[in-house]
Image (cartoon, rainbow, N blue to C red):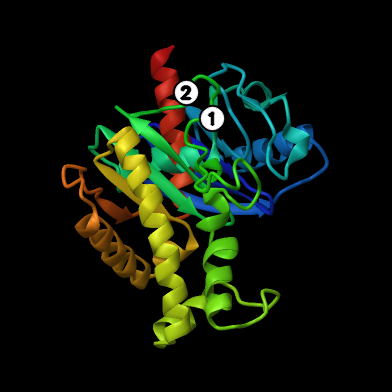
């Protein structure tokens, strides 16, 4: 059975796993993300791989930033890891470890992970929305990430809604349906609390699950926004399934209220021929990026 080394590079930690070709995670761990340059990060990953004393077929890497279809695995932007901007990370890591290496954006890796062994499995067209500080995710069509002409397809955070505001900060999907700038803000306003009030996701859902009416009104407003944007994606891409991930996706009440708001939206619309999206929870949580990175590595190796 072939084994692959998977790496998910984040702003705080680098998660890693040993994964078989049939999507079984054999072991995993993490270490603090080094911030002293791309070379130091490559070395940290390489030493972790070597410490496993395993034979690997390839390396799959999930990273923040834009990753075009480039054989050198060049990263643009890199999110908070600005030292990765314009770095051919795939080439550097592959040469250091003497293994094939594929690099993919973290949201798109999540989508591929759900396609290979999760909520999108078996679909022709599927979408993953990761509700975090912004909106990450990706579009998978026939088992491949759809990137578009500029590798920007699936950057859902930048979908805008209000034409009076235009392409300005605060009008984007990432702000209206990110958990902090979306859900937290709506609930604090409904509870007539200062927007500076410390309230993390756990606190928000403690209020919601305890029957707090103001918190529930905030959640309904949030789900109404989310439902509308899911419909917009449905009429543009017509996916069979939309899978939702991120920390708040572990809350069953989110999906219950979202379904209620979507049902109400489609009940009111005069356009009864619009397909109603199938919305489900992502299955693999934080492991999806690792699984997707390996899936991308295997696909790239098959194409050569």
Query: Can residue 1 be seen in this snapshot?
Result: no
* Rendered residue at 47%/73% (across/down): 218
Observer-nearest of 180 and 34:
180
**Helix, strand or loop at disc 2?**
loop
Mark 2, residue position: 148
* Rendered residue at 58%/28% (across/down): 67
Checking the image for residue 228, the label placed there is: none
What is the quadrant of residue 168 in the picture?
Answer: top right
State if disc 2 and disc 1 touch (CB < 8 Å): yes
Give percent across and percent down for residue 288.
43, 47
Give percent across and percent down for residue 244.
39, 53
Query: Can residue 136 be seen in this snapshot?
Result: yes
Give percent across and percent down for residue 263.
23, 61
What is the quadrant of residue 196 in the picture?
Answer: bottom right
Residue 27, above or below 151: below
**Crowding at label 2, few (<14), some or many (≥20) Cα neighbours within 10 Å?**
few
Give the Cα separation between the discs numbered 1 and 2. 6 Å
Q: Is residue 304 left or right of residue 91?
A: left
Count numbered badges in the picture. 2
Residue 140, above or below 258: above
Checking the image for residue 152, the label placed there is: 1
Q: Is residue 255 left or right of residue 289?
A: left
């Amino acid at each position: 059975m072939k084994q692959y080394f998977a790496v998910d590079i984040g702003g705080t930690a680098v998660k890693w796993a040993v994964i078989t070709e049939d999507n079984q995670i054999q072991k995993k761990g993490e270490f603090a993300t080094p911030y002293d340059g791309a070379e130091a990060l490559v070395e940290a990953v390489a030493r972790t791989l070597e410490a496993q004393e395993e034979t690997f077929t390839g390396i799959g890497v999930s990273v923040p930033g834009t990753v075009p279809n480039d054989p050198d695995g060049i990263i643009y932007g890199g999110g908070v890891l600005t030292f990765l901007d314009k770095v051919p990370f795939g080439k550097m890591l592959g040469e250091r470890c003497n293994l094939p290496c594929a690099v993919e954006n973290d949201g798109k890796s999540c989508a591929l992970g759900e396609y290979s062994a999760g909520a999108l499995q078996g679909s022709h067209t599927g979408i993953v929305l990761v509700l975090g500080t912004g909106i990450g995710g990706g579009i998978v069509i026939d088992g491949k990430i759809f990137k578009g002409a500029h590798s920007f397809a699936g950057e859902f955070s930048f979908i805008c809604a209000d034409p009076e505001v235009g392409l300005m900060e605060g009008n984007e999907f990432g702000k209206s349906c990110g958990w902090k700038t979306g859900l937290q803000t709506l609930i604090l306003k409904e509870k007539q609390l200062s927007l500076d009030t410390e309230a993390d996701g756990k606190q928000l859902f403690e209020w919601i699950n305890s029957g707090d009416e103001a918190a529930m009104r905030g959640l309904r407003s949030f789900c109404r926004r989310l439902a509308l944007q899911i419909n917009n994606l449905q009429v543009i891409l017509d996916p069979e399934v939309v899978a939702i991930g991120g920390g708040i996706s572990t809350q069953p009440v989110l999906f219950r209220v979202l379904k209620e708001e979507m049902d109400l939206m489609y009940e009111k619309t005069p356009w009864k021929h619009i397909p109603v999206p199938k919305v489900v929870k992502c299955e693999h949580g934080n492991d999806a990026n690792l699984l997707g990175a390996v899936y991308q590595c295997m696909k790239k190796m098959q194409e050569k």
